[in-house]
Amino acid sequence: MIERKIENNKRARILKAATQVFAQNGFYNSKISQIAKLANVADGTIYLYFKNKDDILISLFEDEMNKIIKSVKDQINQVQGVENKLRKFIEKHLSLIGENREMAEVIQIELRQSHKFMKGYSGTKFSDYLNIISGIITQGQKDGEVREDIVPGVAKRILFGALDELSSYWVLSKNRKYSLQLSGKLVGDIFIAGIIKNPNE
């Protein structure tokens, strides 16, 4: 038990160091030796946990997605109705981006520099996350709140695409007055207005 805890802590240290190194230097310019130095481990120790730099990046993504999925589900389960749930999803998604700029930069920018991730990632975490949105919409249709002609699989990508663009702009923007939450509210207003059933129908 103690040995496993030590190993988990070492892995967590490596991932935390990698987040900082990737955010500061960019994925392609980062070196395993830089991560090892910041994590205070030998270069060879990295390879006991990860195959290569791409593997570290993908592990970062999956670990972070596990936390995000749990956090978002906890939040939306506290409210009722499709509109409230979607607004809570948007609010939580953007607050998680805003709380950790380094991690946001890694996920929004550096992850997409990995050829292995973009071409060969077969994990389910991203799909699981998008399915939170489609699940809300599907339930809304069953409850008579959402238009029947809305396709949940398409709608989830529309909403995520808008939030993803806002997040990337925020990460890259030098304008610190740019408000993620205000922009998110506007996205929510537009998206919800487009899918909610007209009460007169």
Image: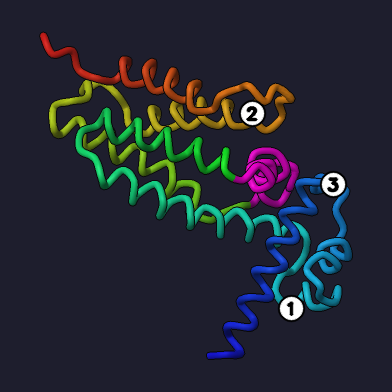
**Residue 53 drawn at (x, y percent):** 77, 60
Task: Confirm or deny contact between disc 3 and disc 2 (CB under 8 A).
Answer: no
Question: Which amino acid, mark 1?
Answer: Leu
Q: Nearer the viewer, mark 1 or mark 2?
A: 2
Q: Is residue 98 magenta?
A: no
Q: Position of residue 94 (x, y in %)?
A: 50, 35
Q: Amino acid at mark 3?
A: Asn
Q: Are marks 1 and 2 in contact (CB under 8 Å)?
A: no
Q: Which residue appears farthest toward the top when viewing the image?
A: 200
- The residue sitting at the front extreme is 177
Q: 147 or 99: which is nearer to us? A: 99
Instruction: Give the quarter of the image for residue 11.
Output: bottom right
Q: What residue is shown with label 3?
A: 25
Q: Is residue 96 above or below residue 69?
A: above
The residue closer to the viewer here, 84 or 151, is: 84
Q: Earlier in the sequence, mark 3 or mark 1?
A: 3
From the top left corner, tell me how far across and down residue 116 is, in percent.
71, 51
CA separation in Å, label 3 and label 2:
18 Å
Q: Which mark is residue 48?
A: 1
Of callouts 1 and 2, the N-terminal one: 1
Residue visible at 75% across and 58% down in the picture = 18
Give the residue pinned by disc 2.
Answer: 170
Q: Which residues are magenta?
A: 100-120
Circle 1 Cα neighbour tier, 10 Å, few/some/many (<14 / 14–19 / ≥20) = few
Residue 161 position, x and y percent, is 52, 28
Q: Is residue 119 visible?
A: no
Answer with the quarter of the image where residue 43 lies: bottom right
Residue type highlighted by circle 2: Trp
